[in-house]
Amino acid sequence: MENKSQSMFEFFRGFVAIAIAIFVAFILILICADDPGKALECLLIKPIFSGGALNAKSIFTILARMTPIIFTGLAVCVMFSANQFNLGGEGAIMLGGFIAALIGIYLPMVTGVHILVAILAGTIVGGLVMIVPAVIKVKLKASEMVCSLMMNYVIMYIILHFLNNVFADRSKGATQTYPFLETALIPKIIPNTELSWGFLVAIIATIIVAFFMYRTKWGYSIRMIGINESFSKYSGMKVGGTIILSQILGGMLSGMGGSIEMLGRYNTYLWTDLPGYGWTGITVAILAKNNPILVPFAALFISYLNRGCELMSIYAGVPAEMIDIIQAVIFMFFAAEHFLSGTRQKIVVKEAKEELQKKELAAVGKGGNA
């Protein structure tokens, strides 16, 4: 009964939070846009329909932009499930992309092997950097949130140093590396679109992470530590090691996402700032309620809104940063523990009354039969 009422409440709470965010966006559109009707059409309809027909290229763009935030969403799900508020996915995805790019430029290999080695290297490096905040948390009891947040900028400036002074292609007008070798580029599922085979890898990763979290003892340990760390410790679980494991896995997923995004959508490394996928991954994980299997659906929702905001910026003059406002409002209401707490209590009470009535009817039925 409790699980049923909790599920009903979380679904309702999520729906209301999203509705409020969209409503806030509508208000801002009415204020900012010269033609609010056109702006709303761009936000809600144009991402998949154009001229009354399906816009296939836009749909493939939405799917392609889901790929990195699926990986960061999964990373956050694993870490948040252990009650570890690690924000290092942003730095890990940037570093994973950078390492994969360097291998894609300077280490010639045969087709297929080159892609796998580059992605594997980015994945491993992403996991290694997450050891730093994890060990600091376990050994020194320092906040992993603060450590990982600061680490993002350390990683970014180290990458920028090497990008500007060692690996930059001076023949270009912008700061970027030399082009990737053809053998390192992830092929497109659909030619002349942004959608690469990395999208399929993201879906496979979702299934693997869901299996790991709900069908293995390590996943069970991570979830139990997130629910009650003290009880887990007294029951004999290796809390410190499991906390470190959860953050390393989060870093590996982020690093893999950065590698696949870089080799699947770009021809050269040109990120000169944090790409933002890590922050978006937090919103995705919150929408998915830390359930890995729901991450692609949450990523699809965010990617759709992102595409809609981009089209509003192009055709209706509304700033593309509207997506940041929508994400912030969603995050605010999901993070507010007491948001709609009265409604939750009503749902629980209603479920309890229904259960009590069923028991009373069953008891009456037994008495009549007797």
Image: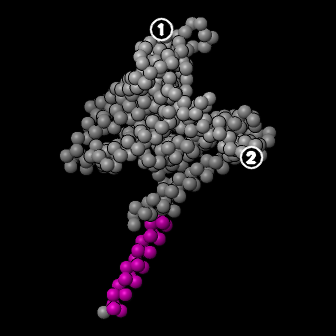
**Residue at point 39% right, 35% down?**
250
**First to last magenta residue range:** 345-369
Helix or strand or loop: what does disc 1 sit on?
A: helix
In the picture, the quarter occupied by the C terminus is: bottom left
246 on left or right of 184: left
Helix or strand or loop: what does disc 2 sit on?
A: loop
- On the image, the x and y values in percent for residue 316 come to 75, 37
Residue 142, compared with residue 49, is above or below; it is: above
Residue 352 is covered by the magenta coloring: yes
Residue 237 is covered by the magenta coloring: no
> In front: mark 2 or mark 1?
2
Q: Is residue 7 visible?
A: yes
Pointer 1 residue: 166
- The amino acid pointed to by label 2 is Gly
Along the viewing direction, whichever of 109 and 213 lies nearer the viewer: 109
Here the colouring is: one colour
Q: Is residue 143 visible?
A: no
Residue 53, compared with residue 112, is above or below; it is: below
Please report whichever mark, 2 or 1, sits nearer to the chain's N-terminal start: 2
- The amino acid pointed to by label 1 is Val
Name the mark on residue 52: 2
Along the viewing direction, whichever of 267 and 338 lies nearer the viewer: 267
- On the image, the x and y values in percent for residue 258 come to 47, 28
- On the image, the x and y values in percent for residue 241 come to 26, 36
187 on left or right of 321: left
Magenta stretch: helix, strand or loop mostly: helix
Q: How many marks?
A: 2
Cα separation, mark 2 vs mark 1, equals: 50 Å
- On the image, the x and y values in percent for residue 3 come to 40, 61
